[in-house]
Image (cartoon, grey):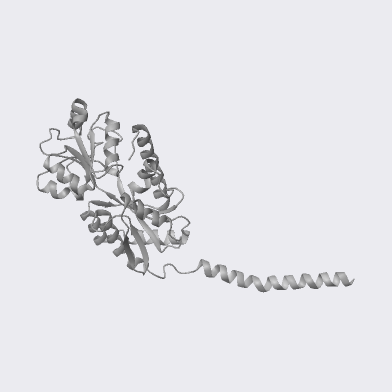
Amino acid sequence: MNDQQDRGRARRRILTGMAAATPLAIAASVGVAQTAWPVRPIRVIVPFPPGGATDNVARVLARSLSPALGQPIVIDNKAGANGRLGTELAAQAPADGYTLLFGGIGALTIAPHLEKVPYDPARDFTPISCIVYYDSVLVAHPGFAPNNVPELIDHLKRHGSRVNYASSGTGGPYHMAFELFKAMAGVDATHVPYKGDGLAIVDLAAGNVQCMITSTSAAMPQIRAGRVKVLASIGSRRTALFPDVATVEEQGLKGYAVESWGGLIGPAGLPPRVVETLHEAVVRVATEPALREGMQAQGGAWVGSRPGEFTAFLKSEYDKWGRLIRERRLST
């Protein structure tokens, strides 16, 4: 009987302790669930130098998102290795929502197929929203005979490797975009890499190379000066800056479209409430005239996709460039 009484008293003590602890546990979990975010400034890593299209668009976005989130947004330029350095730093950041990445096509969907990178694009990041598509164009020296895509394809079929095309660097998005063009059109041309768009376009204007793919914002000064001509828009739609210039696909190369993009990305494990809050803020600022005008000034078009859409887009881009690089046996 004494044993039974002892067991009964022990059981009552356990139940009493559980009853006392339960409200504390509930309160703690509610407190975690209701913790405000953000409560301090947010850092957005831009993996390129200040002054370029990616940096400028990120700053335009930050100016709009800051009041929507109620906290300052600080742009932190971490340039190096064609975007890979800043991307690596973002992958290593705490998953608390206070360090984000304004990432792009090269470091996330192309570079991992060309070399060993210290991050996994699928495992090390949380996609939030694809923010912008940068308008890109196929341009040529005014003295180069072709004036459109069919003429360029015909010229390359006849002259092939004697035609030099420039890019902003081996393994970069515009190098890959021209390689995709070559693969789909069944033509050849010789790649001449430069250290950035600026040097490449200067040499194009001088006639040292015949053609290239680049951003409209980078090419615009030379186009306006008449030193470079536009053959096509390479995206899925015509650029607003050249509405009369048809896309590569509209000119007959079916299925060809390359989107150079910028998106808001967090490290892996970003809490769903942070992702939701960020995306809601993106949706709220989408109609601001200053935001859209700032994007257009950089040759960009607003996207603002949902997290799931952005995740699927990243996978499709990763797979597309992987296939091209394997089939063309490309390397840096």
Question: Which quarter of the image is occupied by the C terminus?
Answer: top left
Residue at the far top in the pictured view: 158
Q: Is residue 119 above or below residue 252?
A: below
Q: How many marks?
A: 0
Q: x, y (%) of residue 92?
A: 43, 57
Q: Residue at x 61, y 72 (%)?
A: 24
Q: Quadrant of residue 293?
A: bottom left
Question: Which quarter of the image is occupied by the N terminus?
Answer: bottom right
Q: Nearer the viewer, residue 205 or 54?
A: 205
As drawn, is 89 to the left or to the right of 56?
right
As drawn, is 218 to the left or to the right of 325?
left
Q: Quadrant of residue 154?
A: top left
As drawn, is 268 to the left or to the right of 129?
right
Q: Is residue 274 above or below residue 117?
A: below
Residue at the far right in the pictured view: 1
Q: x, y (%) of residue 269?
A: 48, 56
Q: Is residue 148 visible?
A: yes
As drawn, is 80 to the left or to the right of 273?
left
Q: Residue at x 47, y 58 (%)?
A: 272
Q: x, y (%) of residue 129?
A: 37, 54
Q: Is residue 239 visible?
A: no
Q: Is residue 111 above or below residue 51?
A: above
Q: x, y (%) of residue 79?
A: 30, 55
Q: Quadrant of residue 16?
A: bottom right
